Image: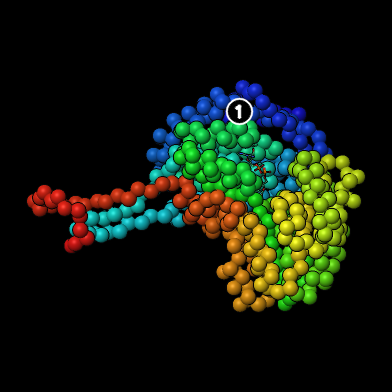
Amino acid sequence: MYTVDNFINGKSYTTSKNSSIIVNPSYGKEIGKVLYATDESVNLAVDSSLKAFDAWSQTGLSYRAELILEFRQLLINKSSEIIDLCTTEAGKTLPDAEAELDRAVQCLTHAAAVQHFYPSHLSPNVAGGIDIADRRYPLGVIVGVGPFNFPILIPIVHSSMALVTGNTFISKPSEKVPSISRLIADLYKDAGFPDGCFNLLNGDKEVVESLVCHKDVSGLAFIGSTPAAKSLKILGVEHNTKVQALGGGKNHMIVLPDADLDMAADAAVSASFGAAGQRCMAVSVVVAVGDIADDLVNKIKQRMPNLIIGKTDNAETQLGPVISQENKDKIYSYIETAEPEGASLVIDGRQISDSMEGCFVGATLIDNVKPGMSVYENEIFGPVLSFVRAKTYEDAMNITHSHKLGNGAAIFTRDGGVAQKWTNEVQAGSVGINVPIPLPTYTHSFGGWKDSGFSETKAFGPSSIDFYTKTKSVATRWPDPKESKVDLGFPKNDK
Ligand code: NAD
């Protein structure tokens, strides 16, 4: 049993009134507890971040990039500890935890190269010898709030771009998986980031809301469920806090009749049941177009019994647990609605997980799902795949459009023209053509459309700099003083 504390101004901070337990979902057993921040610690952290901002924001971009590289190396040195925490607290399988760390390291490589894509725009001699430049400035104190399902990657995505662009950062990780962020706090300090640049506060909704409403917090980078994302966006507007809020997903994978069905079935199984379906980019709906439906559903069904379900301290495990008993119960309750609402349970994963210790849900396949059914409309966030039958491409597109979420979408086909048409028409932030989980690399933008994202900026790529900075246009002229005269007219665009 261990206790996860807060980290303020370079030191552990343990004063706390509330706490919650940390559970290893493979066993459903308590392994530790996390101390929640109090009102006082929220104020202390914001104060410390604000003080650190003065000096930090004046440091050079390349100096900050060097420190990111130092931090990156320290993170790599701690790989085995981090992967271990990810498998025990988040219930990720070993390959999934390794891949997440790998992505986090890539993200730091990208952040350290910020000078190569830092947007700058200068227009020389726009009129009368005046140069105009858009200058960028960091926002100030940024809060980063993450979900449980990427405990390594998301705190690093948020903090690295915030810090390298000159902001100071307060991390509020998911209370279910706080330990990796606590380790990250130590590593930022060890890498040479001055005290106050990276603070860590634990807690739930209350702590997040008090940070967003705090007068000295300038920005919130949020990734989590849609209801929380939406409410924080509104709160941010009310308190003049810039908010980038990414929400949930219900990602459709359309399979056209010309697709290779074995390849499509492999992709559907991998993208639906990987990470026990707990990825915002997981495929949770397959839409089969035309008369391939029976074949495709059978091919998916045949692959499912081969999945190795089990505890994540076993390196062979492919399908691990869901994050908590509460989530397991919620997923079960969605599966229960399937048949009464007219769908067919092809494989009911509960038959496997019912007898298992821990927070497991067996891989579940539901056929004849239609818009309007609970399993279709809601983000289940578990290993449950809905199979929808569409007569034509247009039907498949209408179904996809009807859903309120638009995080990602994929199409499987050999027809480049149709794939292009679909790419242009589909209302989603990340699109895959024969790629089931189109999570881009950091040089490209990432963030959902419709109710999957409440932001004008994106989480990765150059667009993320638009979130972490604000611009000022600066007009400069070096005229000959001899030509100076009083002129009350509004400047004209003349010579
Ligand atoms: P969650 O919304 O319950 O919690 C996310 C974070 O917000 C946590 O730190 C939590 O403490 C805090 N929080 C929860 N409710 C809040 C509220 N009402 N107000 C303020 N803060 C609140 O999400 P989760 O269960 O931890 O994670 C799963 C969700 O995250 C899924 O919906 C998934 O699709 C989404 N997600 C989205 C992306 C993306 O890139 N779009 C990536 C990963 C996960």
- Give the quadrant of residue 411: bottom right
The relative height of residue 163 versus residue 379 in the rendered view (above or below) is above
Indicate the position of residue 367 as horizontal and vertical percent values: 81, 62
Residue 90: x and y, percent?
A: 72, 42
In the displayed structure, does residue 158 sit left or right of residue 336? left
Q: Is residue 48 above or below residue 151?
A: above
Q: Point out the residue furthest to the left here.
A: 482
Quarter of the rendering occupied by the N terminus: top right
Please name the residue that numbered disc 1 is placed on.
Answer: 37
Q: Helix, strand or loop at disc 1? A: loop
Number of marks in picture: 1
Q: Quadrant of residue 435?
A: bottom right
Q: Residue at x 19, y 62 (%)?
A: 494
Res. 436 visible in picture: no
Figure quadrant, ligand 1: top right
Please give the name of the residue rendered at 58% of the width and 68% of the height, measured from the top-left corner.
Answer: 425
The C terminus, quarter of image: bottom left
Q: In terms of depth relative to the viewer, which is nearer, 248 or 129?
A: 248
State the colouring used for the structure image. rainbow
Q: Residue 443: percent from the left, percent from the top? A: 53, 58
Asked whether mark 1 lies closer than 8 Å to ligand 1, one says no
Q: Amino acid at mark 1?
A: Ala
Viewed as shown, does residue 22 lie left or right of 229? Answer: right
* Residue in view at x 73 percent, y 31 percent: 21
Q: Residues within 10 Å of mark 1 (few under 14, many from 20)?
A: many
From this viewpoint, is residue 35 visible?
Answer: yes
Q: Residue at x 91, y 45 (%)?
A: 355
Q: Residue 337 at what x, y percent from top left?
A: 81, 52
